[in-house]
Amino acid sequence: MSWGQRVGPRAAAWALCLAAASLLAACATPGPASTGPGSGGEARDHVTASDESESGRRGRVRMELAAAYFGRGQMTTALDEVKLAIAANPNLAAAFNLRGLIYASLGDNRLAEESFRHALQLDPRDADAMQNFGWYLCQEKRFDEADALFRRALAIPQYRDSQRTLLTQGVCQARAGQWLQAEGTLTRANELDPGNPVVAVNLSEVLYHRGEYERARFHIRRVNGIPDVVSAQTLWLAARIERRLGNRQGVEQLGTQLRHRFPESPESAAFERGQFDE
């Protein structure tokens, strides 16, 4: 399967999550509505009707509804469903993980942090909760605490989503100005998931800041070659890279695309003002 063929709904969803300084952030996810330990990646049998208690079933159903509302941005309704899930099953770690995401989205930092910590008390091996709590701490500029959580998640045996945590960790390192570490982390993420355009954009951005312009060009060109994921941000990054490489024709071509495809974007306005280095 080629790089371009791997871009689908999942990649498009990742591409919608924009962070500061042109870095594309990893989306936080609720994680599975698991009722036992090891939700971060250990193999487990499928839960069937004979395994599940009535309270467990109610909690699972409410969690599924909460996750769906969360995915649509209906935070108040999602919070209502999470509360019902917790009432049905107070030991459902994934419900507290999702509650943390919801409260973070609503700007309630105290309850967000409290929720993430309780999720990890219930399931100390929940790598999804570590991932999401780490991203929350990164946005609060608590970079060392965030990095420690990412490392804990990556150390969970058989963790199935390590490329997502590596992406998030790399973005966080870049936010902290740790460009060399971010390059190494995002390179590992790219090796694990070479078809992920969000990894490619973030790696290109980091390489740009490191002065590795040819390598940055390689990655961003692959992204901009796919119509479904090209954006004002990816064209703007490509234009800045080409300017550093002294390719004036390439810069103008990218500027033309910005003007025609994204005329109202801040990136198009910055191009018109010549604010390449701000």
Image (spheres, grey):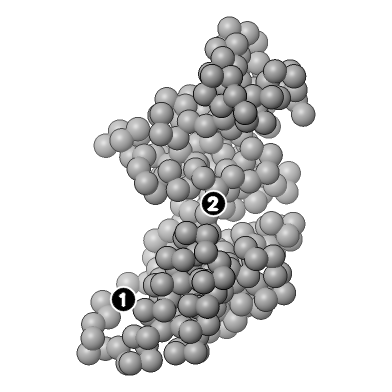
53, above or below 104, in the image: below
Horizontal arrangement in the rendering, residue 235 relative to residue 52 (left or right): right
Viewport quadrant of the C terminus: top right
Total marks shown come to: 2
| Mark 2 or mark 1: whose residue is earlier in sequence | 2
Residue 221 horizontal/vertical position (percent): 48, 24
Residue at the image point whose x is 26% and y is 88% from the top: 51
Residue type indicated by callout 1: Arg
Disc 2: CA contacts within 10 A as few (<14), some (14-19) or many (>=20): many
Mark 2 touches mark 1? (CB < 8 Å): no
183 or 203, nearer to the observer: 203
Q: Nearer the viewer, mark 2 or mark 1?
A: 2
Image quadrant assignment for residue 242: top right
Residue 213 horizontal/vertical position (percent): 61, 23
210 or 94, nearer to the observer: 94
237 or 263, nearer to the observer: 263
Determine if residue 167 is in view: yes
Viewport quadrant of the N terminus: top left
Disc 1: CA contacts within 10 A as few (<14), some (14-19) or many (>=20): few
Residue at the image point whose x is 74% and y is 18% from the top: 274
Please name the residue that numbered disc 2 is placed on. 26
Please name the residue that numbered disc 1 is placed on. 44
97 or 269, nearer to the observer: 269
Residue at the image point whose x is 65% and y is 66% from the top: 106
Mark 2 vs mark 1, CA separation in Å: 26 Å
